[in-house]
Amino acid sequence: MSVIRALHQQLVSKERSAVEITQSYLDQIAALEPTIRSYLTVTADQALAQAAQVDARIAAGEDIGPLTGIPIALKDNLCTQGVRTTCGSKILENFVPPYESTVTGKLRDAGAIALGKTNLDEFAMGSSTENSAYQITGNPWDVTRVPGGSSGGSAAAVAAGECAVALGSDTGGSIRQPASFCGVVGLKPTYGLVSRFGLVAYASSLDQIGPLARTVEDAALLLQGIAGHDPKDSTSLDVKVPDYTQYLKTDLKGRKVGIITETFAAEGIDPAVRTATEKAIQQLKELGAEIQEISCPRFPYGLPTYYIIAPSEASSNLARYDGVKYGVRNNNDSLMSMYTKTRAEGFGAEVKRRIMIGTYALSAGYYDAYYLKAQKVRTLIKQDFEAAFGQVDVLVCPTAPTTAFKAGEKVDDPLSMYLSDLMTIPVNLAGLPGLSLPCGFDNQGLPIGLQLIGNALREDLLFEVGYAYEQATEWHNRVP
Ligand code: GLN
């Protein structure tokens, strides 16, 4: 059952107060953080004060919405007014935003209770949360393994019951891949559906904020709370947000589901991941879906395309950390050495690597060969998806090629780390929504994720198919 619905029921029936619920999550955080380390900041006092306000509203007989009194965790690249926002970077160690991101403001206005800020790869660059300047987060299913990344703190917090639901951000897979590694549900919404105002920018044409949750229904309810037009984000879509919960049905008669041929042909897919995905497809068929194979021939070019476009945008976005406007400054004799020392000390190795790749790809003489070429391939990938959605309602493939790997296993091999996002990246390049949900376990007891991809603004179909699958299976009921 949906965690949000269950808590809402307890609140309106006065079985438990918001303070009691919040305290129980804070207790879980206190008990598990020594081993999981998913939070960078816990805002316990603030959370309990917010909860007391919710209780006062309930006592006064006010009707409350589904998110009122629900304890949530926030990835630490979402600006929170008055609460330190580090982005997992030393350079923002002492940054306390003077303003609130649109999504966190919306949740606060809806009465949701922010428990704290979760760990991430520095500036959301990574697939294991090991690029955080602060701490290594453990996967709740096996703490010697990574939770995935870059929203690893949020995914681990959800899996470990250290929050009811959480927000992450996804530029190339950073919600879906950690969801897959931690056995939870994660949704990367259509580009523009959720405001990016107050999300610390990594690669602006790819970044989207989205929910991490225990069930599809929880993800739908959280998306409902954060989606919608925002004049403060010029890429925000001015569309009517549907009531997503009305699409949660249990049969899939007439739905057309496409299997992306190229994702099964890809090298390096774990046999356990392949088997679980095949079984999940069989299950969709039993629920009434018509299954067909669809080729997206340019899908395999997603990874190299992304590793030109994302670092290019990042190199530009991260130019603002110069020691003058934000965070850490290394005061030195000349202006130039203040800039260079601040950046040399403030950024970690992966961030520097990407700044170098990005500035190189954008430099005069190389721009056409790299950046412009990558943008053209991006269009071709988008066209493959457009052709596919002319034939089917949703596409299906594994979320990640493997289950959670050991901490330290890939830190010295960036290329093998980059391969984690083989199947998620094309979705960001095309601006489409993607949902990852649990579809099995490997023989070491590690969760496997199934990815559903929809056409732009067809989150409704992802919820419909995801919910029907979830109702027919038991995977989401297992806890670490
Ligand atoms: N792992 C990918 C990267 O390192 C995706 C990150 C993300 O989605 N934020 O860029």
Image: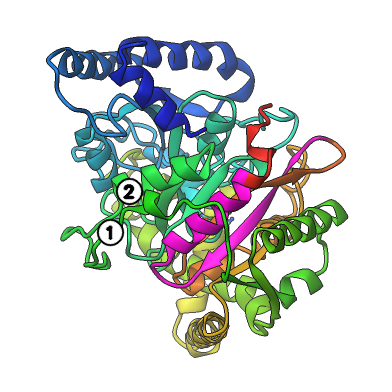
Q: What stretch is highlighted in magenta?
A: 445-471
The residue identified by callout 1 is 241
Q: Is mark 2 on a helix, strand or loop?
A: helix
Q: Is residue 443 magenta?
A: no
The amino acid type, in three-letter code, at marker 2 is: Gln
Q: Residue at x 22, y 14 (%)?
A: 55
The reply, left or right, for residue 409 in relation to residue 307 is right
The quadrant where residue 16 appears: top left
Question: Residue 234: x, y in percent?
Answer: 22, 67
Q: Which residue is drawn at 61% across and 31% down?
A: 137
Q: Do the residues labelled 2 and 1 touch (CB within 8 Å)?
A: yes
The amino acid type, in three-letter code, at marker 1 is: Val
Which class describes the residues within 10 Å of circle 2: few (<14), some (14-19), or many (20+)?
some
Out of 35 and 98, give the one closest to the viewer: 35
Out of 428 and 122, give the one closest to the viewer: 428
Q: Which residue is drawn at 12% across and 15% down?
A: 60
The residue identified by callout 2 is 224
